[in-house]
Amino acid sequence: MQVTSTYSSMKTLRKAMNKSFLLPFFFLLLFAVFVGCESKAVEKSNGKEFNRPESEKLQKEVERIHDEIMPEMSTIERLRDSIETTLALKNDQLSEEVIQQLIRAKEGLVSADKAMWDWMCNYKPANYNVGSDLVAYLVEERISIKEVQNQMMNSMQYAQSTLDQIQSNDQ
């Protein structure tokens, strides 16, 4: 009988030990799940997800404006070449006023070209975290690219009208 009771008490002791070892692991697992869920709740509640659509919309608008005016860089180059050719070939036939108009037109084209290159080099939305910083940055960049767009369009119009004026005077 004593063997059976010893066996029985060892079995009870082993069960108690297993439970006592499992209990800390259970609490550790429960703690890990609790901490993991809590950190996800903090990530979701920091407000970034509310600004994501606004920042994406702004970024697409800024890049759309850029994509619309980028092909005009070749127009700027063509007009600049035409002005240089006109100045080189017809310099002695042009009045001082027309020469100054051509020089101003060329300077405007060079300035617009530089403004576009500068904007492209400085446009770095990846440097900003999603949220109010990115939205503020993109609002400023939208203003900036629209200014570049206006500068490019105005300089091209002025250059083209100046060249057209010279051409009409030649006929």
Image: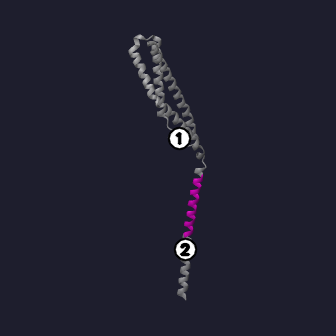
In this rendering, the answer to whether 7 lies above or below 136 is below
Residue occupying the point 46% across, 14% down:
168
Q: What residue is shown with label 2? A: 17
| Numbered circles on residues, count | 2
Residue 65 tag number: none
In this rendering, the answer to whether 15 lies above or below 54 is below
User: In front: 94, or 164?
Assistant: 164
- Mark 1 Cα within 10 Å, few/some/many (few <14, many 20+)? some
Residue 160 in picture, x, y percent from top left: 48, 20
Instruction: Tell me if 56 is positioned left or right of 170 in this view.
Output: right
Does the magenta portion include 36? Answer: yes
Which of label 1 and label 2 is nearer to you?
1
Q: Residue furthest left?
A: 89
Say which label, 1 or 2, has the lower sequence index.
2
In this rendering, the answer to whether 127 lies above or below 146 is below
Q: Which residues are magenta?
A: 22-41
| Location of the C terminus (image quadrant) | top left
